Image: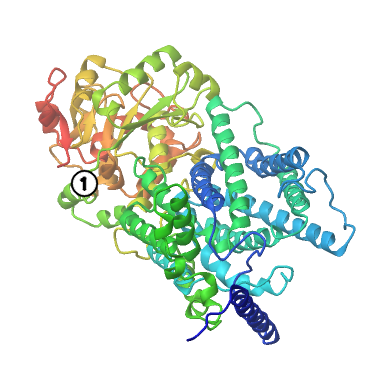
Amino acid sequence: MVSTPTSATSEQVRYSVDDDLTLQDVDRLLQDDQHGDTNTYPRLSASSSSSGYNGVALVSLASLFFSSATSAYLAPHVATQSLVVVVSLPFVHFALLAVLAFAHGVLRPRSIFGGGANRISLGRGDGPEEQRTKKLALLTGGASAVAMVLGLWQARWLDGKLGQAVEVFVLPTLLALAPLLSSSLTSVAHSSPLAPNFTLSCLASAFLVGLALFGVPARHAGLALAALRLPVVAVNMILLKEGLGEEHLGTYLMGSATSASLVSLVVFVLGLIHGSNDSLGWMPFHEYIYLALYHVSTLGAQISLLVALYHLASPLQAAITLLPRNLILLLWATFGRGGLVLRSNWLQMAVILAGGTVATLATDDDLSESVLQVSSRVGLSKKEGWNKEHLPSAHDYSNAPRNHPSRKLVGLAFLPLLFYFVQSPSTTTSLAAACSYLPTNVRSTLCHTFTAPTSRSVDLVIAYYNEDLAAAKHHIQAMRERPFIRERQNRVLIYNKGPRSEEELREKIELKSSDEVIPLPNYGREGATYLKHILLHYNSSIAALASALDPSSLTLPSGLDEPTQEGLHRSRVLADHTFFLQPHLAWDWIANPRIDLVGPDTGFAHFGPMMKNNCGEDMRGVGTFPYVKDIYNIFRGEVCPRDGVLSAWSAQFQVRKGRILANAYHRYEAFDQLMEAEDGHWIHELWGANDSGGQSNPALGHHLERSWPLIFGCSDPKIAEECPDDVHVKEKCQCLDN
């Protein structure tokens, strides 16, 4: 009969086995150090456990996801404020963090994050450990400040969706830099590597995001800032993870916030000096709301990141929130139209981000285990039915080869991004240039419909000088109440050539926060204003469509697509339908019924009296306008027809985006230069029907006023015959795009 060991003997056997395993791990670590082989990431022995995260870590990850998504959504808007406002944002952010750290240290000095946070001390410290803590705090604070400054300037110079996509490459950057920095992070014990499937999922997600960027146009300066920011963010997260393992944690947090405040203060002072000419007046109230929300979201993201890093095994596990964050922002962007450079790649990018999110979360073993633990605690699953032995933890990979494939594939993840950077991303297919080479009869039908005839957005472009504000307010509100406009996302853009301030116009007209007021010099009548709107939005609209076609070597025109003071708008993409109007509705008994006829298939509709123009001769007998035939030749590419063309009085009309883009950019640009030509230019030698002339009221403006129908491919003079002033029939009075 075999006797069973006593309980004391079994305990001795268990302790002996555990001790042997521990000694084996120590021997393995010593051997790795001798061969210079280190693990990918340090793991905090104090705050991490082999049993996964805990509820606090999961909550902090969720908070990081939502707060960072809000911050990223608001960043492109706040980054377009004046230079003084933009450079003040990092300083205010880190100063608030320092105040919060100090208050926490005073109120809860015995908490994990409170010890030493109730005093500001950037000196060398009393002992080696404290000196190291303060040195690490200085480095972390500097990296944090630089990362935020670069992020704001990236948002200022790069499309929001594109910048967010490039940010995903923080994942492979972390994998690449962590081994290089681990030799200097001697105070933290080297941990077992993360699961190969997890790191491979991160690398694959970044690789596919890079592929999806091919063909998306971008500014080189913005891409340079985005590329420079990647290693700064990665180093910052590694330093934060290292610092959160310090014994004097409160001192580290307070020192980091103080260091970041000082660095951002230097940037703020330099910005004040450089932007001394910027207006420091009061902004509209809604702008302060945006700034406040941005600060709240960035503070929430920073605090959530600190808590998450304290409980997680590696900074890579916190960085994976970039994938679901970008997915939510991409989905949210479908409800609007502003800045959607990635629109043509929307489905591809959405699938990549969704797949990357699922893959990284599913292969993060600690997260899977923690979800099971939390669910068992709240009663979602039975604890006794849960067996964690089927879940491989990080310890299971401790005896695996150190150089697993994911370590060798880090460089491959950057190849699509590198190719995108060097293949001239500011070039793309010009749809308008292709249409310019087509025959007129083909261009007039094909070029208006080569994109899907969407009808989701409307812009009301108002050419304003100094007209009565009450009348302008009534006119704009009445337009917004039209069913076609009310049922769509609509926006008012007032181009102000008069003496009134933006604040006065917003207050008296009661504009919405999404509306814009753009100052312009008083040149070229309303015609130059309409041309300016087209030029400011033309290239971004082409960019939003171009990647649906094969990229070519054709370069987008430069000029007004640059982010000048005039061009810093929330959305620089043309609406699906644009109404070009003045502060009052001329010929309202004609215009009102015709406005009500506008529908999704309306390509062009004029709201004033229409007549036949015999290539310069107004058939209603108010004068001759010889440049009409030249305008027809420029925009239609042929001689003015013998039967004449359609013309109209009063520049108030609606046009679909496809018709605007069917004309080449350089034609709008050349005509705009003539409209704003200086006094003494030969164009002013022609006097108009009202004996007008000069830069502010050029005679050419009267010719352009009558030429808008033919510019946008609605030049059949039969429309004037079938649609006199008292006729309001859609099929007779409009040019339709089926």
Residue at the right extreme, as displayed: 126
Image coordinates of residue 313 in percent, x first then y, are 58, 63
Chosen colour scheme: rainbow
- Percent position (x, y) of residue 434? 27, 57
In the shown orientation, is residue 420 left or right of residue 499? left
Tally of marks: 1
- The residue at the point 67 percent across, 84 percent down is 27
Residue type at the position of mark 1: Val
Report which quarter residue 615 is drawn in.
Answer: top left
Q: Which type of secondary structure does the marked residue at label 1 adopt?
A: loop
Q: Is residue 64 left or right of residue 335?
A: right
Q: Is residue 395 visible?
A: yes
| Near-viewer residue (614 or 333) | 333
The quadrant in which residue 18 appears is bottom right
Please give the residue where the numbered disc 1 appears in the rendered image: 639
Observer-nearest of 582 and 145: 145
Residue, x 66% and y 65% (percent of image)?
A: 45
Residue at image x 33%, y 38%? 575
Q: Is residue 624 above or below residue 673?
A: above
Q: Position of residue 248 (x, y in %)?
A: 78, 55
In the rendered view, would you say 620 is above or below 202? above
Q: Quadrant of residue 646?
A: top left
Q: Nearer the viewer, residue 186 or 675?
A: 186
Comparing 130 with 331, the one in front is 130
Label 1: how many residues lie within 10 Å, few (<14), some (14-19) or many (20+)? few
Q: Position of residue 151 (x, y in %)?
A: 58, 51
Q: Looking at the picture, does residue 728 appear above or below residue 426?
A: above
For the question of whether residue 699 can be seen, the reply is: no
> Residue at (27%, 40%) from the top-left corner?
711
Instruction: Give the vertical position of 622 relative to 431 (above or below).
Output: above
Query: Which quarter of the figure is the C terminus placed in?
Result: top left
